[in-house]
Amino acid sequence: FTLRGTVERMAAQLKEKELNEERLIRTKMEAELQALQAKINPHFLFNTLNSIASLISENPKAAESTVEKLSELFRYTLKSAETNTVSVAEELEIVRTYLEIEKVRFGERLQYDITCDAAVRDFMIPALIIEPLVENSIKHGIASEVHGGKINVEVSTADGNCLISVIDDGKGIDKANKGNNSFQVVLSV
């Protein structure tokens, strides 16, 4: 009876462990899906689609180009969910694509400059780490400014680390610091 009881307890523990593993897998999949959905800002999508709609009759080539850029951005978003890391060069290219899409909406009100030290171009970083910072600069620094503003994206090396800086000259979240809005991420090389 003791052996039978031990086997039954072990079987119950094994079944409980399997159920917990299934729950963890399901929770992980749900979290990944939520993270992917969070990466695609619905306001950005709606604004871009409205910009494309207005371009169709005025400038069909620009509308087509914007659709291609939007498609590239979504492809990158889906790819990044699978790979998790990308080179700095890849990430900066998608940031450029994102900014070009936003320029359709903001026109000359949005200026930008992207610079990168050659030493860190191939450095692997988490995918979509820079784009949200640029998106925040547009949302909080540039969008509400009548004359717009400029965003500088700089990737350099500092003390053996990869330093990512996103700086805008807009009003920002803290209105007292106009012209001094920046986000920085430091990653070990």
Image (cartoon, rainbow, N blue to C red):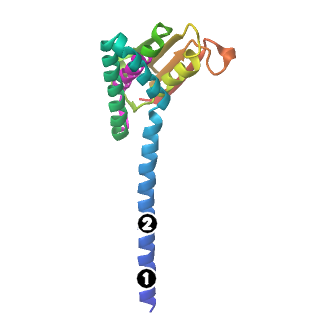
N-terminal-most mark, 2 or 1: 1
Depth check, front residue: 180 or 97: 97
Name the side, left or right, on which 105 lies relative to 67: right
- Circle 2: residue type: Leu
Callout 2: SS: helix
Q: Is residue 105 magenta?
A: no
Name the side, left or right, on which 121 lies relative to 50: left
Residue 130 visible in the snapshot: no
Q: Residue at x 44, y 39 (%)?
A: 37
Callout 1: SS: helix
Q: Quadrant of the C terminus?
A: top left
Q: Residue at x 41, y 82 (%)?
A: 7
x, y (%) of residue 63?
A: 34, 17
Residue 99 visible in the snapshot: yes
Depth check, front residue: 163 or 17: 17
x, y (%) of residue 163?
A: 47, 23
x, y (%) of residue 5?
A: 45, 86
Circle 1 packing at 10 Å, graded few (<14), some (14-19), many (20+), is few
Query: Where is mark 2, residue-wise?
Result: 19
x, y (%) of residue 88?
A: 37, 25
Query: Where is mark 1, residue-wise?
Result: 8
Circle 2 packing at 10 Å, graded few (<14), some (14-19), many (20+), is few
Q: Residue at x 31, y 17 (%)?
A: 65
Q: Residue at x 45, y 63 (%)?
A: 20
Tell whether label 1 touches label 2 (CB within 8 Å): no
Task: Please determine whether, in this image, residue 139 is positioned above or below residue 41.
Answer: above
Depth check, front residue: 122 or 106: 106
In the orientation shown, which residue stands out farthest toward the bottom?
Answer: 1
Boundaries of the magenta span: 84-102
